Image (cartoon, rainbow, N blue to C red):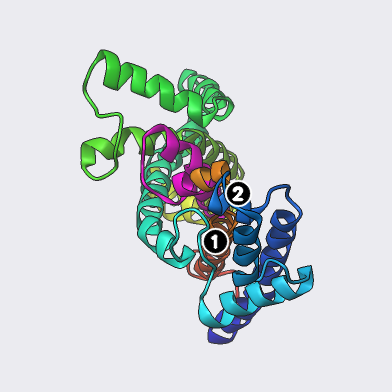
Amino acid sequence: MLKYIVRRILLLIPVILCVMTVLFTILYFTPGDPAHIALGQEATREAMAAFRAEHGLDDPFLVQLGRYIYRAVFHADLGYSYVMKSPVSYELSTRIPTTMKLAFWAVAFSTLVGIPLGVICAIRQYSFLDSVTTLVTLLGVSMPTFWTGLLLILAFSVHLEWLPSMGFSTPSEMVLPVVTLSGSTIAIIARITRSSMLEVIRTDYVRTARAKGQKERSVILRHALPNAMIPILTIISMQFGLLLGGSLITEAIFSISGVGRLMIEAINMRDYPIIQGGVLFISLAFCLVNLAVDILYAFVDPRIHVR
């Protein structure tokens, strides 16, 4: 297990380096002068030239790329924000806990709702409940996040006045953002759980467990569900990474001070170091979650041997 973990961590290095290279290349060739953005419309040519020289923007592309990767990897230096006049690592460190909290609760809520819903639909296949759930899940997948968030604000904040529409510090403020972000994820997890459970409950060992006289609840929870968890865990890990990226819209709608809102502000102001740092954080978090789930496979299903 230790060798497997070390090998997977080492494999993350080229992935992150590729992400950094591609992202830096795209932003490098994106129209816009960082000196002009940082100094404003009335900056003189001398001031902009001094700014470029100070930040190494006059150097060739490969020199800038190598310097960026070297500083990020060996010094955890992601650069300096052109607009906020502060280190990117500092700006991200103040926003990451909020974004991780939002994504964690969205995944937890989606899992607690999606898995039982999928199991019930699999047990009662083609029933009225299964048909209604299928319709609702298709609707949940089809509705974009910004539309769901606006509808929830209109219903529960404007008309009913039950929940606040801004912030993420109190439990009442967390409800609408979490439900908004997890809407499509619940639908996806429920559909995957239903499909996986339908395959498992028709197997011979499930029939044998029933033939031995075990209760249906025990058959489902002890025999069927654990063996159906591999695709469910896979989709949950993928959704966690997608939720980190999808938090941009949710944080903007509910005025949550997280990485997503920071990146939107940076995109509007063309603050490239902030954009690079935010995307790098999301990529690294996605890779680490996938690594954790791969390791969890061996504990959920003993048939899988990690080497």
* Residue at point 36%, 47% (across, down): 105
Pick the residue in front: 198 or 8.
8
* Structural crowding at the residue carrying mark 1, measured as other residues with C-alpha within 10 Å and reported as few (<14), some (14–19) or many (≥20): many
Residue 8 visible within the image:
yes
| Helix, strand or loop for disc 1 | helix
- Horizontal placement of 170 versus 1: left or right? left
Count of picture labels: 2
- Horizontal placement of 294 versus 223: left or right? right
Kind of residue at disc 1: Gly
Pick the residue in front: 176 or 21.
21
Kind of residue at disc 2: Thr
Q: Main secondary structure of the magenta part?
A: helix
Q: Residue 235, how many percent across, how many down?
A: 57, 49
Q: Residue 203, how many percent across, how many down?
A: 60, 49
Image quadrant holding the N terminus, namely: bottom right
- Horizontal placement of 283 versus 91: left or right? right
Question: Please, is residue 216 above or below residue 157 in the view?
Answer: below
Decide which of tag 2 and tag 1 comes sooner along the chain: 2
| Helix, strand or loop for disc 2 | loop
Q: Residue 80, how many percent across, how many down?
A: 51, 65
Location of mark 2 (residue): 203
> What number is the disc on residue 263?
none
Question: Please, is residue 111 above or below residue 299 in the view?
Answer: above
> What number is the disc on residue 277?
1
Q: Which residues are magenta?
A: 234-263
Quarter where residue 230 is shown: bottom right
* Structural crowding at the residue carrying mark 2, measured as other residues with C-alpha within 10 Å and reported as few (<14), some (14–19) or many (≥20): few
Q: Estimate the spatial distance between the alpha carbons at disc 2 and disc 1, rounded to whole Å.
A: 48 Å
Q: Residue 27, how many percent across, how many down?
A: 69, 55
